[in-house]
Image: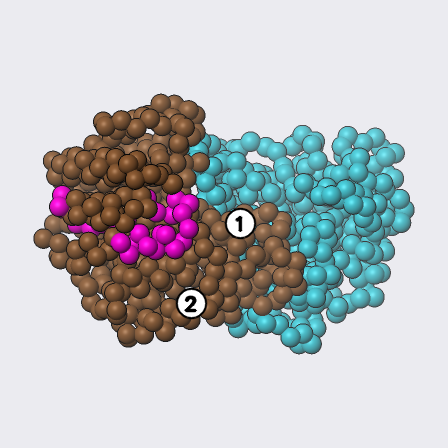
Chain colours: A brown, B cyan
Amino acid sequence: MFNNFFQIEARCGAARAGRLCTAHGEVATPVFMPVGTLATVKGVPQETLEELGVEILLANTYHLFLRPGTETIRKLGGLHRFMSWERALLTDSGGYQVFSLSDLRKVREEGVEFRSHLDGALHFLSPEIATAAQIALGADIIMAFDECTEYPAGREQARQSMEMTARWATRCKKYFEEHTGEAPWKRVSSFEFQVSSSRSDTGNSKLETGNSSQLLFGIIQGGMHADLRRESAERTVEIGFTGYAIGGLSVGEPRTLTREMVEATLPHLPPDQPRYLMGVGTPDEIVEYAALGIDMMDCVLPTRAARHGLLYTSEGKLAIKNARYADDAGPLDPRCGCRVCARYSRAYLRHLYSSNETLAAVLNTAHNLAFYLDTMRRVRQAIDLGHLAAFLSEVRSHSLNSSAHREDPA
Amino acid sequence: MFNNFFQIEARCGAARAGRLCTAHGEVATPVFMPVGTLATVKGVPQETLEELGVEILLANTYHLFLRPGTETIRKLGGLHRFMSWERALLTDSGGYQVFSLSDLRKVREEGVEFRSHLDGALHFLSPEIATAAQIALGADIIMAFDECTEYPAGREQARQSMEMTARWATRCKKYFEEHTGEAPWKRVSSFEFQVSSSRSDTGNSKLETGNSSQLLFGIIQGGMHADLRRESAERTVEIGFTGYAIGGLSVGEPRTLTREMVEATLPHLPPDQPRYLMGVGTPDEIVEYAALGIDMMDCVLPTRAARHGLLYTSEGKLAIKNARYADDAGPLDPRCGCRVCARYSRAYLRHLYSSNETLAAVLNTAHNLAFYLDTMRRVRQAIDLGHLAAFLSEVRSHSLNSSAHREDPA
């Protein structure tokens, strides 16, 4: 039942290049998924994302649950239609964001009570409610509602959290199976929309209302304990999902530990199903994890760093505010083929950033995403050609700062 | 000598449709010039402005003088190259912004001493310095350095200010004539640029380094006194410029008075030269002034209003934050053909604005500019077809709030 939506087409060591088939088009893997928290990649119009070759975007259930509300989006035909994005979407379950609220949340067996970071209003998320919200949003890939284990956490705390996640995973799967076919786009013909698909000039309508469904992925937890990771993987696989995510990492632990946990988990995941490492990473990290056999990753780093004027280039990371760029007529990255590098100089980008101009965020984000997407394109090509090791050492020689970033609540 | 850069091709009543020929391409008139204060129309990439059909942009000398500095831009090849905009540019002289600083400035015969709105640093602008700055920037059309008369101002104050403006105009013209051919793009071949024209994918290189020059426009002042306006016009025309701007309006006076002053000035301007009304206006105002025989206008209103979620449509002005749009799947303006209206719903735009997302400003600004540019396209067509009166009454029936806006210092 799994292989009809994920095909591995090439291997190179542990790495694999493949295709993820969703109801909204195919996604070449390994893939980096830009984060569009509130149904927008901050500052970047959807037409630019299409131009960049983005095939799948991530959006955050927690944020959309609060604004504009998942029911509002469902009534408007689902997230694809709401944000006019006809390619694939993945939503997280909200587990990570609720975890990040720390003092504002109370975890019980039934679910999590939390206060909105916006207005302090009390809300409740449970495996069933988070799954229902994701069905209402209608992303192609949706995630089980997990409890993200704190870092650091002792063995007993990590075990309890992992076991709660496993019990919640069972409930998510049950709810999901009882509500198959309820994604808004599965019922699209029963709605009357004023902005019809034909008005969109994306020229890329991939909507299929036929035999495709949403796909539910499970999430592995277990803190920084290799044996709990293994146990979490085994229990989650036993419940059975169409893909598996490694969660609870990039929560403040050192990078070597992240890698150790990924390596402890991977052997216990089915080899023919997609593996998603949540919340990583830097350009060199995404290459390294692809080399370990990860198929999907997401991170706010390229977009958030862009807004802070930190730009990734073939020569390393660059802080555009630096005075040395004030009269630099050269392109941001001479080896980059993106629109920003083709058209604008470092001097201009520096001026926009220094002057606090909105266009700085717009252009910087487009470039950083181009850099990440191009990196993954090269990873896939290197896997195809069997040259991944060479590419990996090239990337390491430009190694960038390590730290991973996901979308926090506020 | 004047008619080689401005041709009137059609007339309808007092209105005229024509073509302004600049060193960076032709501009169909009447034209509305979007404001790109700091060498950027806030939030909108240059490729989007090209797509919208923008043929000329305005930039502010005062702002660029402070950041990044006109000498920096000159060294980088001038403003066109700096901001990667190969179509026409107009710079104001800084007179209006310095005027807006009120307490921070001291006006003397020699020029104006003022404190930067950014850091309080002391600066000095004079007719010569402002003209030199505009030559360094290299805009196709540059403006004389004027003293913008306060509102309200008594006759004597208005007369003194108008006379100062006339004396300054003579000095501007003298300086300009002594420095012809010094625009950075006139010497472009002597520079070595890393970002060459060929890297730009605008597909629209209009740079001519041959027989074209910068054009200097004079500015009419005279406060709200019709006789002083006439005298200012006569004196400015006597000095002789390639075009004439009506300045000192949209400074807080009622709209009827603005119109009265425009009507008092126009008969005293040469009929075959371009007439530029500075700092107006609303969509209905730009149509009305075109009908009076104005050829060029600029205003921050469409871009600033967009950032505040105020959107111009064929059905009037719309505040997108309004709760009624939260579940409105229809396009912003069903009669607008812009990319934003073709792709995104009111519900989505409302969500972006309510969530304080950067994309709100990006999309709203693109739409408002499309609306303004389309309005002027229809004005030109109506003049061509002799139907301007009918178009004017159609526009008046959707009459929008009156008030005019220019770029203040901060």
Task: Pick whichever, B294 or A365, lies toward us.
Answer: A365
Position of the C terminus of chain B by quadrant: top right
* Visible residue check, residue B134: no
> Do tags 1 and 2 sit on the same chain?
yes
Q: Amino acid at mark 1?
A: His
Position of the N terminus of chain B by quadrant: bottom right
Left or right of A276? Residue A234 is left
Instruction: Provide the secondary structure element on which disc 1 rests.
Output: loop
Task: Pick whichever, B20 or A405, lies toward us.
Answer: A405
Mark 1 — residue?
A308
Q: Position of residue A159 (x, y in %)?
A: 26, 38
Identify the residue at image location x=34%, y=71%: A389
Res A126 → quadrant: top left
Mark 2 — residue?
A395
Q: Amino acid at mark 2?
A: Val
* Visible residue check, residue B71: yes
Q: CA distance from mark 1 to mark 2?
A: 23 Å
| Image disc number at residue B6 | none
Label 1 lies in what chain?
A
**Residues in magenta?**
A238-264
Relative to A87, say whether A162 is above or below: above
Identify the residue at image location x=32%, y=74%: A387
Q: Nearer the viewer, mark 1 or mark 2?
A: 2
Label 2 lies in what chain?
A
Q: Position of residue B288 (x, y in %)?
A: 59, 40
Instruction: Provide the secondary structure element on which disc 2 rests.
Output: helix
Q: Position of residue B61 (x, y in %)?
A: 71, 52
Q: Is residue A77 magenta?
A: no
Task: Pick whichever, A116 or A148, lies toward us.
Answer: A148
